[in-house]
Amino acid sequence: MGTTRRKKAKEKRRYKGKQVKRSRKLSKRAKKQAAKRKVRRNALVARIQKGWGRFSAFLKKKKDQFLHLCSRFPRFWHRRNMDIAQDPGEGCSHWADRPDIRPGQQIAQESCTMTTSNNSTATAPLTVETFTFHSLLGKGGFGKVMLATDAIRNERVAVKILKKRALLQAIKRRPLIKHEDILVESRVLQLANESNFLIHGNAAFHTENYLYCVMELADGGNLFHFYDENFLELTTITFIAAELVCGLQFMHSRGIIHRDLKLGNVLLTSDGHVKIADFGLSLLNTYGKTDAKVLGGTPAYMAPEILTQQSYSAAVDWFAFGVMIYKLTLREFPFPGENRAEITKKILTQEPPNLWLTDDVTEDFISKLLCKNQFRRLGVKGNVRKHRFFSSINWKMIETGKATSPVKPDKTSMYTGQKQQIHAPNSEAFKEPIAAMDQSVFDNIQFVCPKWSETYHN
């Protein structure tokens, strides 16, 4: 019996050992199969995510097209946004009490707002879909300017589109640039509505990736193209200079230094009046001398104190103004050069040549504006308006903006006659999200001017 038990126990242990070895072999095989299943599962998840991303982008595109269509038809837009409880029935029967509006007729500005039960005015939201874009007006390092038409007001505007990432990267590359500096243009555009000689800002808003500044359209082109195609008499130059003086003095009275004043940044209206534009490099709250020592502007227009990185004031704008008057009068730059180093050397060491070709009054005016010493420069020392160069100017008439301009812009400029429509120039799809901390920089940028607030809201 004992022998039989021992044999059975031995056989049992042997059988159990075989089972363990077999189970181990099965576990290795299972691991390989599990690894293969994991790879296939991950590939499937990746394909599903990719397909879902494309599908969501497709839905967003269709949604944007739908919103754009709504914005193009104000009646449908307001019906879409009105309270369902106030809808009297099917169709557009709630317009039956408006005999002045026929089907298909565009609603006037005062008809685009609706009064709700709580006596508040309902306005349309201001988004990218609010505008129909026509063509590209200009392009810069951070974005571009587009010609557009807003849906309800049916008004031609210029929309400046800036890339948020480019602005944030510029801040990271240049530690001296503050976060507030990227909001300068929108703030100046709000103040610009108080002056007849600055381009007015209608609104500003932003999306996930882009910043939009809506400005009035100066459809006479810029001063550089007008100067390049026309010979300007001294009376015309004097008129242009007088309106520029009004614009500059308004900016300086509000503590704003332009820093990039040049012919290309001065626009003309269809009536030939001056509009200073492009405030991206402006400085705010600069009453008197500032601590700014950063290079900024176009080399040919830079004042000596900027090039030597000294503390400067609004005198830098008067130096650039002097370069503009010299260019308009003698049709060449006072400090020409083939490269930046040569231009800088001439600005710092040489006097403007060929001034003797002008009359004594113009020579004295330009030489005082181009004075190397910022504290003795005309505009800082002495009132520009009282110089003999402006002896024929009626400043009260100029200030009103109603003086007859001798400037006659080309009516066939690139701003007129644009009827083609293009899609929104920027897409929000397939872009990595910007961090919430960086997005907070743009929180205070949106605004709607009083004139547009009757129609749109942010």
Image (cartoon, rainbow, N blue to C red):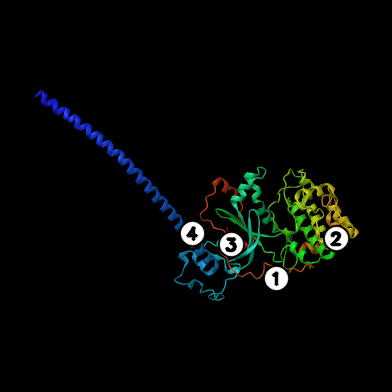
Question: Which mark is first along the chain, 2 or 1?
Answer: 2
Of the numbered discs in the image, which one, if any, rests on residue 456? 3
**Marked residue nearer the N-terminal end (3 or 2):** 2
Left of 198 or right of it: where is 357? right
Q: Amino acid at mark 3?
A: Tyr
Taking the spot 11% from the left edge, 26% from the top edge, the residue there is: 4
Q: For the point 76% across and 69% down, which residue is it?
A: 408
Q: Do labels 4 and 3 touch, CB within 8 Å?
A: no
Q: Nearer the viewer, residue 187 or 207?
A: 207
Query: In the rendered structure, which amino acid carries the disc numbered 4?
Result: Lys
Which x, y percent locates residue 102? Answer: 54, 76
Q: How many marks?
A: 4
Q: Nearer the viewer, residue 212 or 3?
A: 3
Residue farthest top in this picture = 2
Task: Tell me which label, 4 or 3, sits earlier in the chain.
Answer: 4
Secondary structure of the residue carrying tag 3 is strand
Q: CA distance from mark 4 to mark 3?
A: 23 Å
Looking at the image, tell me whether mark 4 or mark 1 is earlier in sequence order. 4
Residue denoted by label 4: 60
CA separation, marks 2 and 4?
58 Å
Packing grade of label 1 (10 A; few <14, some 14-19, many >=20) is few
Question: SS class of the residue under badge 4?
Answer: helix
Q: Amino acid at mark 2?
A: Phe
Name which quarter of the figure residue 414 lies in.
bottom right
Residue bearing mark 2:
390
Q: Position of residue 128 (x, y in %)?
A: 56, 60
Nearer to the camera, 177 or 92: 177
